[in-house]
Image: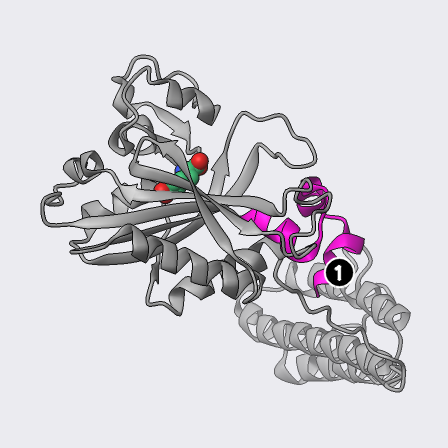
Amino acid sequence: MSDLIPQLNDYSEAALDQAFTGLLDEVRRGAATLASPEAVENFRLEWLGRKQGRLKLVSDAWLKTAPVEAKKALGMRFNQLKQEIGAALEGGAAAGSDKKAASLDISLPGIAPRVGVEHPLVKTMQQVVGVFKAMGYSVGTGPEVETDFYNFESLNFPPDHPARDTQDTLVIADQEGKPLRERLLMRTHTSPVQIRTMEKQPPPLRIVIPGKVHRNDAADATHSPVFHQVEGLCVDTNITFSDLKGTLDHAMKALFGSDVKTRFFPSFFPFTEPSADVQISCPFCGQKGCRKCKYSGWIELLGCGMVDPAVFGFVNYDAKKLSGFAFGMGVERIAMMLYGVGDIGQFYSGDMRFLEQFA
Ligand code: DAH
């Protein structure tokens, strides 16, 4: 018999009590010394070690050979011993971590939480949206993967119309089996959300739509295949080109300063008639002429026009009673002007030295 466990003479209650009391005392004495992780581990091995642990020895020497009628009394005491060992180990582990807590120096400087800020593009987008919100516009969004119908057909781009070519569309693969209007593509502009909005909502309507758009453009200092636009749509009875001019003139003054002037040039978009490009007087040189305005004093900033009646036809709006205007502008272009950024790629580089300047 190993000296790690006492001799058990018989299985009487008295003999069992004496034997287990001795063991429990040893567990408690051992438990009082568990001040370090090493001591806890040694204690664990001593009692719970798989081959030579004292609990295993007790089990082998006493439990396995006990007569059936003594098994219950033995088992109960055995379980109590096991629990006591478990409790001692838990207490020891806790004491070890208490020691760690006590060695924590609370006078050391803490880890400062870093506060995030809006990305300059998001900030610019919100700024533009904010100008229109203040004029009573609501804000909407739509999907970036669109059907040909929403991106083109319902905006009055007929199939094979050359205006489709100007959009350098990125298409989703394996769509040839579908009818043209159902084929999926990456939206090339936010204008499809005009249609989605009018399908859902009856007039009158005033809404701006910020969002990401995609074109098969090579990246350079002013182009990126992924960029952002803010779309606008206003539909009611008696909306005129004067309303369009007044609204956009106000918006440009709100964004670039009240001394900025606007002018409207004839242009073409399939979904507006008439269509216009809007230029603002160069806010950098006060129209004296500089590199940014190519010495013309004016900078082209957005497209707009009166909603083509054919577009109303696609959404069951009554073109005889209603009129409206729409506009679309590039967020990157505005952000580059507002913050004096020369290379569009900086917005997507993730370079903290660039981004931190907007904090
Ligand atoms: N969707 C046009 C583009 O991406 C921009 C645009 C022009 C939007 C005129 C409009 C608009 O709503 O009326 O080139």
Mark 1 Cα-neighbour bin, 10 Å: few <14, some 14–19, many ≥20: few
For the point 63% across and 56% down, which residue is it? 283
Find residue 180 and report its horizontal and vertical position in percent: 28, 18
Find residue 270 and report its horizontal and vertical position in percent: 32, 30
- Which secondary structure dominates the residues rendered in magenta? helix
Find residue 206 and report its horizontal and vertical position in percent: 29, 58
Res 12 quadrant in image: bottom right
Residue 343 on the magenta span: yes
Res 148 quadrant in image: top left
For the point 25% across and 32% down, which residue is it? 154
Please state the quadrant of the image where ligand 1 appears. top left
* Residue 34 visible in the current orientation: no
Please indicate whether residue 312 sits to the left or right of residue 145 in the image. left
The residue carrying mark 1 is 356
Please indicate whether residue 79 sits to the left or right of residue 236 in the image. right
Residue 129 on the magenta span: no
Find residue 136 and report its horizontal and vertical position in percent: 33, 67
Colour scheme: one colour
Q: Quadrant of the C terminus?
A: bottom right
For the point 23% across and 55% down, which residue is it? 239
Which residue is farthest front?
A: 288
Give the magenta-colored segment's residue range: 331-359
> Residue 314, relative to residue 256: is it above or below?
above
> Viewer-proximal residue, 37 or 174?
174
For the point 71% across and 59% down, which residue is it? 60
